[in-house]
Amino acid sequence: MKTLKFKLYAHKRNRHLKRTINAAGVIYNHCIALHKRYYRMWGKHLNCAKLQSHIAKLRKRNPFWQSLGSQAVQDICQRIEKAYQLFFKHNKKGVRPPGFKKVKKYKEWVAKKKNKVVVFIGQWYPSSKTCRECGQVLEKLDLSVREWRCPSCQSVNGRDENAAKNIQAVGASTVSLGDVRQASPAITA
């Protein structure tokens, strides 16, 4: 299939051609909008037969759309169908989750597909307030404090990094993987 590019000059001889091209553009944009709406509502693409029957009904009511021939309208619908099939080729059934609302269920589903284990720790586990080095738990730690010093071992802990290390260690010990150590860099400066 070849695509050609033309410049259409404003002349009275080209008036009919310009009107036909504009009608084709309006129908094309309407078909794309229908596809988007259908996908948002049902989660799948609109097939070509339904789209063609819908456009045929609309063409009967709209004289501007009747300026374009029925073969051209069918060609527009078929081109859009082919484009959506190519888009959805990678999203076959079973690849996407079947509409899980909760993150926990989604993570379990992905882990099951990849033969992995997901370990959830308690929501109120004090991962930010626990010192990674000695295990000391602070009684209170404001959200505005991004770094804090441990009162027992004097190590400086970044809130997010410390919480990530503690969550990793708790998850590994729950699954009986033992102690999880941070990887050491190959080259040190």
Image: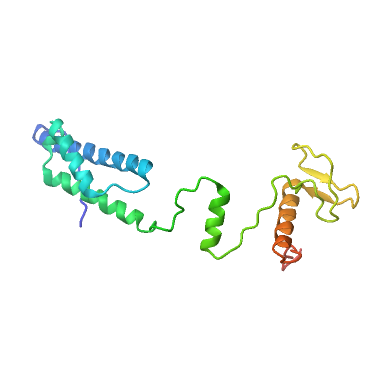
Q: Nearest the camera: 180 or 28?
A: 180
In the image, 177: left or right of 102?
right
The N terminus lies in quadrant: bottom left
Q: How is the image coloured?
A: rainbow
Q: How many numbered tags mark residues here?
A: 0
**Front residue of this view, candidates 56 and 3:** 56
Residue depicted at x 74% and y 48%: 125
Q: Where does the C terminus fall, quadrant-wise?
A: bottom right
Q: Position of residue 30 (x, y in %)?
A: 26, 38
Q: Residue furthest bottom?
A: 186
Residue 5, can we see it?
no
**Residue appearing at x 56%, y 48% in the figure:** 103
In the displayed structure image, the side of residue 33 where residue 168 appears, left or right: right
Q: Can residue 2 be seen by looking at this rendering?
A: yes
In the rendered view, does 129 fall on the left or right side of 153?
A: left
Q: Estimate the x, y position of residue 63 in percent, counting from the top left.
A: 12, 31
Quarter of the image holding residue 143?
top right
Q: Is residue 31 above or below residue 132?
A: above
**Which residue is the extreme one toward the right?**
152
Residue 57: x %, y % from top left: 16, 37
Apparent side of residue 165 relative to residue 49 in the rendered image (left or right): right
Q: Residue at x 72, y 68 (%)?
A: 186
Question: Which of the 4 image quarters holds residue 15?
Answer: top left
x, y percentage for residue 120?
66, 53
